[in-house]
Image (cartoon, helix red, strand yellow):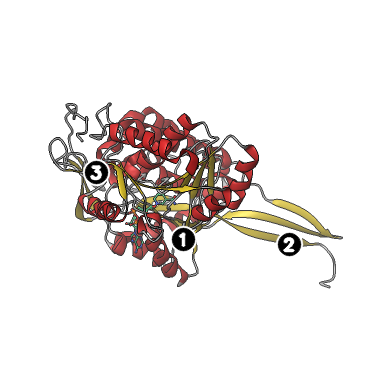
Amino acid sequence: MTKKSVFAPRSAWTPLRITRDGREFLRVSTDELSTYDPATGELVATIDTSSLADVDMAVSRAREAVTRSPWRNDGALRARVLFRWAERMRTNAEDLAELLTREQGKTLAQARSEVQSSISMIEFNAGQARAIYGRAIALKDGVHGVVLREPMGVVAAITPWNYPLNLTIRAVAPGLAAGNAVIVKPASATPAIVIRALEFLAADGDLPSGILSVVVGSGATVGDHLVGHAGVDMIAFTGDSATGINVMKRAAGGLKKVSLELGGKSPNIVFADANLDKALAGAENAIFSAAGQICTAGSRLLVEDSIHDEFVNRLAARATAMRVGDGLDPQTQMGPLISAAHKRTVWGYIEIAKADGILIAGGEDLVKAPYDRGHFVAPTIVTGLPSSSCLLTEEVFGPVLAVQSFSSEEEAVTLANGTEFGLACGLWTSNLDRAWRMGRAIEAGTIWINTYHHFYGETEVGGFKRSGVGRQQGIEGLLEFTETKHLNFDSNTNLW
Ligand code: NAD
């Protein structure tokens, strides 16, 4: 089977050289780190990295800024700064999308969508910055309680490479809207796009110095130092579940608040009464979007047995016809994996799929031209797996779909809940009562009904079980970045 992708000619790219010069918010001073286009191997950017002393400096500047500047008490100021950031991002959206594709590999259409949803996330939180209300209550004669939401203080936002812009902004925007100082540590595969986007925030003359900092470097050194730092009050972490557990343990030493957005193995459940054309498009998007490198990937397809063969054959035909290639090529539907190392991991799962089940699409290692300079695999679908197969329980984080069938709602719920994860779920049915029943029975933070992968700044995301702790986005996501304080006023003459 030959993939039809052709690499369209590319425009010339001058690699970025990112240093601290002119970027006061970037706390870097030491060895360089380079990033490479996952489709071509081309150098994208070289960035100076942070020493542990740079991290210490970022924390002390953040503490000072959050204590001494008007930021924590002035919601209108925060709203203005955030709205202007959104505006600058909008003006530069096309450049940001191109850099995102070059550094991360996703298609330009997906990159544009990530930029736009990031802007929308900033705007939602900018609006909320002026509306962080508390409550007041008359408690007894002459006694009143006022309950306020205050910023946590200094927040470390540690973010992954798969949606680097969106997942960084998902922490930075509410963190700042709530009045905190935020120190960002981007993933080492995608720091340039994060720094570029944050430059549009740092450019604001009204953003107090020290309220935003970026540190760059490995998780094991720079990330770990940030998590363990006594001057950091909260860790907003998005990444792998195993890393998240270690971050939580490390943060426990200082009893720091953690918000953890972790991995998934999300079920996508198709009933025979669904709009099957829409469900097919949804199933394809759920697993092959961003080459499956998305925490909410619908990586387990559960299909009602009466339509199983027809539905799965149609999906396999779509997967086989997908154009895999360079994200900058407008014809491309699925880009590469992030790195050679990640491709080896995904390939290991494809080998297991071949051994454990029946491949009905993909399974090829795309290594010949035009794929020879990047990290490509074909969209892959496997059926007939034994229930013991790790393909049904472990996160692959690549374009590998495991299919199962079911014959009743009860069986679908049992299969859907049968992993350690609980991040998201898709339900495809025209039966409203069933959608309610299933939606309540499935253990996941997001249940998409007759849709998949739609995210809104207004609505919360997060995981049950091994998929996370706390929520991001929406009002709850903003309030994660606050402490609750009760001011108790007593005007009576006697204490008791
Ligand atoms: P990762 O856990 O390897 O890294 C995430 C971030 O943590 C990076 O910035 C990394 O440098 C840092 N880090 C690593 N070790 C650290 C340590 N000991 N202390 C502090 N920081 C450390 O994850 P990844 O490979 O970048 O991203 C892929 C994973 O992220 C997948 O498991 C995916 O499901 C998950 N993810 C979850 C969500 C969500 O919202 N739930 C979203 C996107 C990705």
Q: Residue at x 27, y 30 (%)?
A: 332
Q: Which residue is mark 2?
A: 488
Q: CA distance from mark 1 to mark 3?
A: 27 Å
The response on whether ligand 1 sits within 8 Å of label 2 is no
Query: Label 1 is placed on what type of residue?
Result: Glu
- For ligand 1, give the image quadrant: bottom left
The x and y percentages for residue 352 are 28, 56
Q: Which residue sits furthest front?
A: 306
Q: Quadrant of residue 263?
A: bottom left
Q: Is residue 226 left or right of residue 447?
A: left
Q: Which mark is residue 377?
A: 3
Q: Which mark is residue 420?
A: 1
Q: CA distance from mark 3 to mark 2?
A: 61 Å
Above or below: residue 131 compared with residue 84: below
Q: CA distance from mark 2 to mark 1?
A: 43 Å
Query: Label 2 is placed on what type of residue?
Result: Asn
Q: Residue at x 36, y 30 (%)?
A: 93
Pick the front one: 93 or 154: 93
How many marks on residues? 3
- At numbered mark 1, what does the secondary structure look like: helix, strand or loop? loop
Query: Label 3 is placed on what type of residue?
Result: Val
